[in-house]
Image (spheres, rainbow, N blue to C red):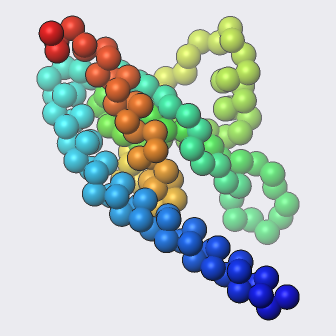
Amino acid sequence: MHDNLSGRAAELAHLNDLIRTSLSLADAAIPLLNEQLHALAEMGIDNLELEGPRIYSRTAGWSPAFDDEQTIFAAALTMPGGLGCTVWSADDYATRYGDSHHEPPVLRERFVVYDKLPPIVRAMIPGVAPKLIAELLSCFHVLAR
């Protein structure tokens, strides 16, 4: 049993290291990207909302009472705003993606800027940020000619 616990402690230490490394890389890169996105917004690219995949979910609260409500964080890029996440309840998220006949929501109302996100969520954004930025750049590919 002791060996099993030692192994689990090592696995947890490895996970902790991975999260810290990713968070460190994210905290170094994302603010620089957001500065560039802010500059683009000042040039008039100020009405754009791109939502990426769901990157993290957790229980909605810390109450000791049993509650299976979930909060979902989906990566997003808004102009203005930059990289961050939209925050949803599990029910709202399921409704949004379960009904193909809905009007797209205004993501800006659910958007949380990178600096205000929990550390674990910030650590996950670099995995999806390149795709969101590529999607933004593809909107302006004609300028690159």
> Residue at point 63% right, 43% down?
72
Image x and y of residue 123, in percent: 46, 56
Outermost residue, bottom side? 2
Image x and y of residue 28, in percent: 28, 57
Q: Nearer the viewer, residue 92 or 76?
A: 76
Quadrant of residue 137 within the rendered picture: top left
Image x and y of residue 40, in percent: 19, 28
> Would residue 117 be visible to someone looking at this image?
no
Quadrant of residue 20 within the rendered picture: bottom left
- Residue 89 against residue 59 in the figure, above or below: above
> Residue at point 41% right, 42% down?
84
- Residue 62 against residue 10 in the figure, above or below: above
Quadrant of residue 10 within the rendered picture: bottom right
> Residue at point 36% right, 63% down?
24
Point out the image quarter for the N terminus. bottom right
> Residue at point 26% right, 42% down?
34
